[in-house]
Image: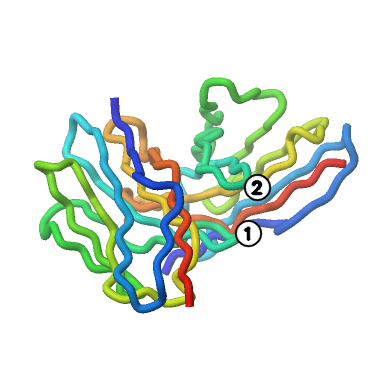
Amino acid sequence: GAVVSQHPSWVICKSGTSVKIECRSLDFQATTMFWYRQFPKQSLMLMATSNEGSKATYEQGVEKDKFLINHASLTLSTLTVTSAHPEDSSFYICSAIADRSYNEQFFGPGTRLTVL
Amino acid sequence: AQSVTQLGSHVSVSEGALVLLRCNYSSSVPPYLFWYVQYPNQGLQLLLKYTTGATLVKGINGFEAEFKKSETSFHLTKPSAHMSDAAEYFCALLSGNQGGKLIFGQGTELSVKP
């Protein structure tokens, strides 16, 4: 089956620093990737849609300058949380769509970000 | 507008009992529906999906769901709960006109008592 990885699985950083999270499709090419944020005991909140070779489309209320997304290749998208603050602490999950299965998203294992 | 509603944020069953997790949707176009399971600190795993065709869909781990258009429902069932089924379950609807976006329900936490 299609596998999506995320790195790192968890990260702790100091307030004011930037953190980069990678999302990779391991055995398929992902034309579209999605980034979600999940707070404890809550559902997934879509942050942005990332298409290879073009700018990401952000959901309403998500700060573009705060959460930088780059989809540099068909197998890699990155989310950079810039100048992180404690309120950015959350579980970040990516997913990917391949053309061959347009109606199914394959999810990564998530990244736990803790900002001190 | 499209939406997904999961009835019951928390469901508790005894081991061996029937599992029923409820999901209702609203969509102006024929829906593609999904059930995902999430274990603590992990990503989402697809249990099953409905796109077209047979309305009774069988998934992994003994789960199944029935698409009922007249009731706009897609409830998830499993005849006999296992302890390992304890997790968070999400029902999702593929957005018909927004490039593959998923619309998630609020989630239902399933607890299984010994």
| Residue B36 as seen in the image, left or right of residue A67 | left
Q: Badge 2 is on which residue? A: A91
Q: Residue at x 59, y 43 (%)?
A: A38
- Residue situated in front as seen by the camera: B82 or B51: B82
| Count of marks, rendered view | 2
Say what secondary structure mark 1 lies in.
loop
**Whether label 2 touches label 1, CB < 8 Å:** yes
Image x and y of residue B82, in percent? 42, 77
| Residue B13 as seen in the image, left or right of residue B43 | left
The label on residue B41 is 1
Image x and y of residue B2, in percent? 29, 30
Report the amino acid beneath label 2: Phe
Report the amino acid beneath label 1: Asn
Name the image quarter holding residue A88.
top right
Measure the C-alpha gap from mark 2 to mark 1: 8 Å
Q: Residue at x 40, y 72 (%)?
A: B14
- Residue situated in front as seen by the camera: A21 or A60: A60
Whether labels 2 and 1 belong to a single chain: the reply is no
Say what secondary structure mark 2 lies in.
strand
